[in-house]
Amino acid sequence: MKEVLAIIRRERVDATKEALLKAGFPAMHLCNVEGKGRQSGLRYAEKSGEGMEESPGIRFLPKKMLTLVVRDKDLDAAVDAIVKANQTREIGDGKIFVSPISDSMRIRTEEHGEEAL
Amino acid sequence: MSMVMLRAIIRPEKTGEVVESLEKAGFPAMTKMDVLGRGKQRGIQVGNTVYDELAKTMVMVVVEEKDASKAMDAIAKAAKTGNYGDGKIFVSPVETAYTIRTGEEGL
């Protein structure tokens, strides 16, 4: 099993949920986070007395964190669905991290492993 | 290239210092969230009141494996006060990272 952790734009959450549902991943966990990437947040020029001036910018931007656990063979489909739904080709589209999950358990039925997904 | 994710649970008031320390060490990218938690001391007791859900901030950084100890040092140096409640850092493996903008692999 693999965990797919994606940091995405907040306004893209609905599109992402729909895309994942269509690809066969109805289950996920969403969370509000703040983050910044390699560009260290948002920087822009601001009008001041003598003209345009670099403003200190906004360091942390509000993002949504989406986590889902999938079977190994479904990994590419899940990553594809998230990338397609979130790609605007502008800086700030976010990142996807894939990590291994050693076990899982459905608490209601006490099933373990991939059966629990 | 193998990567690791550092999840640091730190004091909320130390967040600014930790962020700056990470930036200085060359890790500008991170995600933070507000969380509630308690540690081995089971929270804190003041008089008759027990606080067992203490406000903390979780900072998430994904770095290359060889940079892990450098990033951990940067976090620890800024977050340490020497008292109970300074927090913990957890390290877990990350197999792949994708940049959504380009769809390419890599940090």
Image (cartoon, rainbow, N blue to C red):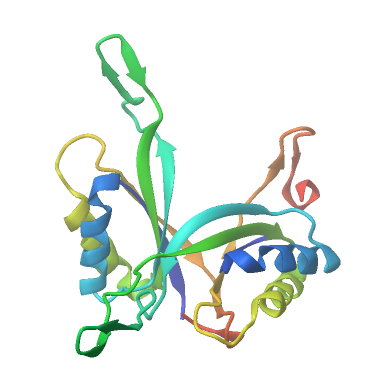
Give the farthest residue toward the top.
Answer: B48
In the image: residue A4, left or right of residue B66 = right
Tell me which corner region of the image, top left, top right, bottom left or bottom right, holds residue A24: bottom right
What residue sits 35% from the left and 80% below the top? A43
User: How far across and how far down the image is residue A41, in percent?
Assistant: 38, 74
Q: Nearer the viewer, residue A58 or A48?
A: A48
Tell me which corner region of the image, top left, top right, bottom left or bottom right, holds residue B17: bottom left
In the image: residue A1, left or right of residue B106 = right
The answer to whether A32 is drawn above or below residue A107 in the figure is below
What residue sits 58% from the left and 68% below the top? A8
| Figure disc tally | 0
Give the farthest residue toward the front.
Answer: A49
In the image: residue A27, left or right of residue A61 = right
What residue sits 27% from the left and 78% below the top? A55
* Residue A98 visible here: no
The answer to whether A31 is drawn above or below residue A92 in the figure is above
In the image: residue B101, left or right of residue A115 = left
Q: Nearer the viewer, residue A78 or A71?
A: A78
Tell me the quadrant of the picture where the N terminus of chain A can be found.
Answer: bottom right
User: How far across and how far down the image is residue A100, in percent?
Assistant: 59, 62
The answer to whether A113 is drawn above or below residue A38 in the figure is above
Q: Nearer the viewer, residue A116 or B100?
A: B100
User: How far across and how far down the image is residue B85, in percent?
Assistant: 26, 37
What residue sits 26% from the left and 67% below the top? B22
Give the farthest residue toward the bottom.
Answer: A51
Tell me which corner region of the image, top left, top right, bottom left or bottom right, holds residue A37: bottom left
The answer to whether A55 is drawn above or below residue B80 in the figure is below
